[in-house]
Amino acid sequence: MTDEKNSNEDAVENPDGAPEAAAGAGEPAADDRVRELETELAELKDRSLRALADAENTRRRSQRELGDARKYAASGIIKDLLNVSDNLQRALDACPPELREHDEQVKNLVIGVEMVAKDLLNAFEKHGVRKIEPLGEPFNHDLHQAMYEVENTGKPSGTIVEMLQPGYVMHDRLLRPAMVAVAKGGPDGPPTGHERVDTTA
């Protein structure tokens, strides 16, 4: 009888014993859950940063592509007009100076053709197009196309000694290389350095 009473008294003195034990057992589970949430939060933050970086890269790329599209928008039609410019120059070259001096009509015709050729080149320049006439310059693979070599020119090897067709550059892009002939077998010229030119226009 006394033992039963003591047992009941112990139960009364510590009525919260079972909940305390349960709370102690639940603490590790709560810590694990916190760590899981922190890991998930870090992953979500990393994904957000990557998404923002991708969006910024896409924006910059789009701006660059839009800028290039505007900058080189006229490259197609200008390429088609290069032959027109060449033919105008050929027409001028085909008329000998003495004929211009002695025939007033021919002289006036030549002046008209010269004006058209000049206006065409001015229109090219407004769109950032520059004519390449490299006679006497060192050969540049980025700007020139060698058609053949010429020996015994007295020029350093690799020097352009003939220009068969001028080239054109639009801003920093090559529209058409200059067709040239280069010296062969002469003294070695000084090494030349040049920037590479974009050829995707």
Image (tube, helix red, strand yellow):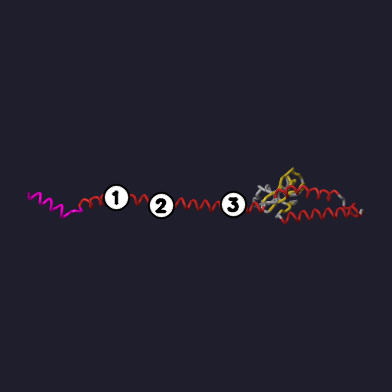
Q: Residue furthest left?
A: 1
Q: Which amino acid type is marked by label 1?
A: Pro
Residue located 34% across and 50% down the image = 33
Q: Which amino acid type is marked by label 3?
A: Ser
> How many neighbours does mark 2 have within 10 angstroms: few (below 14), some (14-19), or many (20 or more)?
few
**Judging from the image, what secondary structure is the residue with disc 2 in?**
helix
Residue located 59% across and 52% down the image = 62
Residue 74, given in percent of the width and then of the height, sits at 70, 51
For the record, the magenta segment spans 1-16
Residue 171, given in percent of the width and then of the height, sits at 68, 54
Residue, disc 3: 62
**Judging from the image, what secondary structure is the residue with disc 1 in?**
helix
Residue located 14% across and 53% down the image = 10
> How many neighbours does mark 3 have within 10 angstroms: few (below 14), some (14-19), or many (20 or more)?
few
Using the numbered discs, state the Cα–Cα distance from disc 1 to disc 3 in whole angstroms: 51 Å
Q: Earlier in the sequence, mark 3 or mark 2?
A: 2
Residue 2 within the segment the image draws in magenta: yes
Using the numbered discs, state the Cα–Cα distance from disc 2 to disc 1 in whole angstroms: 20 Å
Residue, disc 2: 41
Q: Main secondary structure of the magenta part?
A: helix
Residue 62 at least partly seen: yes
Q: Count all numbered tags in the image, as a single digit.
A: 3
**Judging from the image, what secondary structure is the residue with disc 3 in?**
helix
Residue 158 at least partly seen: no
Residue 109, given in percent of the width and then of the height, sits at 87, 53
Q: Earlier in the sequence, mark 2 or mark 1?
A: 1
Q: Earlier in the sequence, mark 1 or mark 3?
A: 1
Q: Which amino acid type is marked by label 2?
A: Leu
Which label belongs to residue 28? 1
Q: Say which of 100 and 5 sits in front.
A: 5
Q: Say which of 65 and 128 sits in front.
A: 65
Please say if the residues under marks 1 and 3 sit with CB atoms less than 8 Å apart. Answer: no
